[in-house]
Image (cartoon, helix red, strand yellow):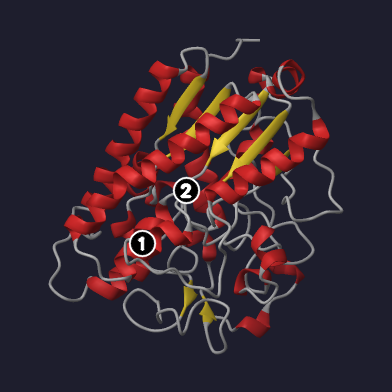
Amino acid sequence: MMTLTSFSVACHAQVSDASVNLLKNCRFNKIFQFGDSLSDTGNIAIEVPNIISAKLPYGFMSNFSKPTGRCSNGLLMIDYIAKAAGLPYLHPYMNRNAHFKHGINFAVASSTAMSVEDLAKRNITVNDKTSNSSLQVQIDWMSDFLATYCMPGRDCESKLKMALFMMGETGGNDVNAALLNRKSDKEIKALFPAVVETIMNATRQIIKFGARTIVIPGNLPIGCLPVYLAMYGTKGAAHDKNHCLRRLNHLAIHYNRHLQNGISRLRAERPGVKIIYGDLYNAFEWLIDHAPALGFDEDSLLIACCGAGGKYHVGGFAKFCGSRGVSVCSNPDGHLNWDGVHPTQKANKYLSSWLIKDMLPKLDCPSS
């Protein structure tokens, strides 16, 4: 292990692009990203300046000069997707000095799909020290941006026609909040229709704005997250073939089915719009199955790189990555997970590559 003080310029390793240029034929001229920490390129660091993801060791392997608020040791999936489309990295909406010529990132780490108030009505509380910028807040930001960018109707439709809209991943933190509030599986499953309808309503709004190509990603196999394995995995819980928590993965599968059903209904409502399910669950399943062949350490697949203590190198939220005394593994590229919750840069590279290849036939882009 190396301590947080041992970083040097040599640590800022460059990585090759995933699926280079595969999305170029789609000719997207902009990307608009909504969601949470899997996609946030810096909004949380502006909204909550003392957030740990705005400090080292976060971002130490990226090619940026300092941590940006990305919840990883480097780049995120949206960074690789933008590169594959031939576009620059997306600036966060809250960076008022940025240009938004190629799109905007509205995602905010720790945000939920449902509003904090709606979750509270279900006796689900959300950490009030992090973001309250739920999906609807992000949609409202998009509306504010469009008010200065285009005229409602044909003008906006024309300017957004060649844009790619990424609706998340969002909803994962609603599930996380329910789990951390010790809700039963029955109560958590009862939440899913409301979360999905929130996402579908947000998608309806961006379609009204002029969106014509939309990707709605599902949830990851959350039973493979070191933070949950540390919480539940040592208490005789059932594990699957990948040594992940069977119960939590079943919850993720159940949620993803609700989401796919919602997408199917929305496609029927809006037949002129491409609405694509982003299958993060199977992307991660593929990655964990092929990880050793891709250079990941077979003994570290479910162990956090940055953390403290225990079988999964997770010291709970009191000893989270970035806290005093927390250590970083010597080879982050050998790990799928960075901090107990979020993928490493290398994992994001392969997850985005799988997603892009899975989406391409559904996007039906020109062949040349």
Q: Say how many tags the image has.
A: 2
> Between tags 2 and 1, which lies in front?
1
- Residue at image point 72% right, 44% down: 89
Pointer 1 residue: 121
Q: Is the C-beta separation of discs 2 and 1 under 8 Å?
A: no
Rendered image quadrant of residue 163: top right
Q: Does 340 sit left or right of 311 as displayed?
A: right
- Residue at image point 58% right, 78% down: 322
- Residue at image point 52% right, 18% down: 273
Give the alpha-carbon distance from disc 2 to disc 1, as whole Å: 20 Å
Q: In the rendered image, is residue 26 in sight? A: yes
In the image, is residue 140 above or below residue 270?
A: below
Pointer 2 residue: 170
**Residue at the extreme bottom of the image, as rendered:** 325
The answer to which of 357 and 237 lies nearer the viewer is: 237
Please rate how many residues cluster around mark 2, counting C-alpha atoms within 10 Å: few if below 14, some from 14 to 19, many from 20. many
**x then y, percent, for residue 255:** 29, 45
Among the two numbered marks 2 and 1 on one chain, the one whose residue lies closer to the N terminus? 1
Rendered image quadrant of residue 96: bottom right
In the image, is residue 91 above or below residue 118?
A: above
In the image, is residue 307 above or below residue 196?
A: below
Q: Secondary structure at mark 2?
A: loop
**x then y, percent, for residue 86:** 72, 30
**x then y, percent, for residue 310:** 34, 82
